[in-house]
Image (cartoon, rainbow, N blue to C red):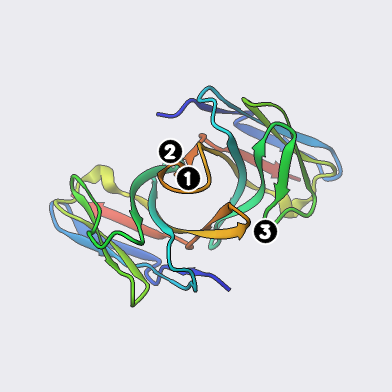
């Protein structure tokens, strides 16, 4: 079975601090994609960052970066200089091969991140 | 933001009644998906479509059917709603299923309450 585990149900940090959200996954595939999405109180699912497994360089998007450890099957998200608007649920997702060339996103249960003023 | 709308945004219905949720996109993306979101489960795939009239089941498809008669519209039907189908339903789209084009973009969600 291919699964995605987010071990931190909830985290809170002070504004401007750096926070790291963890994600581990299980797969026997060699090439795949990993994603972080955020879901603010508005409930909109918003793509934060994505990583291709065959790329060794960690993806970055402004204040958001990942620490991708392929051998350890770990894909953590680091948020630098956290802002109040970062308060949201954060979901890690892994792209799984369904059949032929059809893929499916497998989701973790989410981490609730609260940024305190 | 990707042009994805869902209707209705909120619905309350009674057990045993049929319900249809609509997803509409203006991006001309080939792939469309229906998910449900429940506490503690993240998102779970119900059905997906890889083209007009081409659909397939996801991991939680029982009790749901879908149709796609046009590229831009993907309908999710609960033939006879049950209380276990109370959830938030999200539609998503993607250009492809491999590579960067497989990135999925989401609609605003539909909150469904089955009494």
Q: Circle 3 sits in a helix, a strand or a loop, which is it?
A: loop
**Quarter of the image that includes the N terminus of chain B:** top left
To which quarter of the image does residue A23 belong?
A: bottom left
Q: Residue at x 27, y 47 (%)?
A: A86
At horizontal 33% and vertical 76% (from top left) the residue drawn is A71
Answer left or right for A67 relative to B83. Answer: left
Marking on residue B59: 3
Tell me which chain the residue with mark 1 is part of: B
Q: Quadrant of the C terminus of chain B?
A: top right
Mark 1 Cα-neighbour bin, 10 Å: few <14, some 14–19, many ≥20: some
Vertical placement of residue A95 versus B77, above or below: below
Q: Secondary structure at mark 1?
A: helix
Residue highlighted by disc 1: B102
**Disc 3 and disc 2 in contact, CB within 8 angstroms:** no
Q: Position of residue B24 (x, y in %)?
A: 60, 26
The residue wearing badge 2 is A42
- Left or right: where A74 falls relative to B112: left
**In the image shown, does A29 or B43 lie closer to the viewer?**
A29
Chain bearing tag 3 is: B
Q: Secondary structure at mark 2?
A: loop
Mark pair 1, 2: CA separation = 24 Å
Q: Residue B32, position in %: x, y?
A: 60, 38
User: In the rendered image of this protein, does residue A41 appear above or below residue A79?
Assistant: above
């Amino acid at each position: 079975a291919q699964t995605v585990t987010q071990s931190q149900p909830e985290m809170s940090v002070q504004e401007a601090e750096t926070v790291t959200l963890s994600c581990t996954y299980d797969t026997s595939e060699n090439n795949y994609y990993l994603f972080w999405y955020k879901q603010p109180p508005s409930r909109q699912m918003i793509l934060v960052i994505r990583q291709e497994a065959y790329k060794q360089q960690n993806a970055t998007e402004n204040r958001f970066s990942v620490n991708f450890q392929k051998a350890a099957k770990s894909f953590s998200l680091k948020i630098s200089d956290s802002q109040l608007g970062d308060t949201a649920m954060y979901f890690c997702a892994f792209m799984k091969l369904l059949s032929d060339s059809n893929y499916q996103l497998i989701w973790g249960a989410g981490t609730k991140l609260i940024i305190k003023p | 933001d990707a042009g994805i709308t869902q209707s209705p945004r909120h619905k309350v219905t009674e057990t045993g009644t049929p319900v249809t949720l609509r997803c509409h996109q203006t991006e001309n993306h080939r792939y469309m998906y229906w998910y449900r979101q429940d506490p503690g489960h993240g998102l779970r795939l119900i059905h997906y479509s890889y083209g007009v009239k081409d659909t397939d089941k996801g991991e939680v498809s029982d009790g749901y059917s879908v149709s796609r008669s046009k590229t831009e519209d993907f309908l999710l039907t609960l033939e006879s709603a049950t209380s276990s189908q109370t959830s938030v339903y999200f539609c998503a789209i993607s250009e492809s299923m491999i590579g960067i084009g497989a990135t999925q973009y989401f609609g605003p969600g539909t909150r469904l309450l089955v009494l």
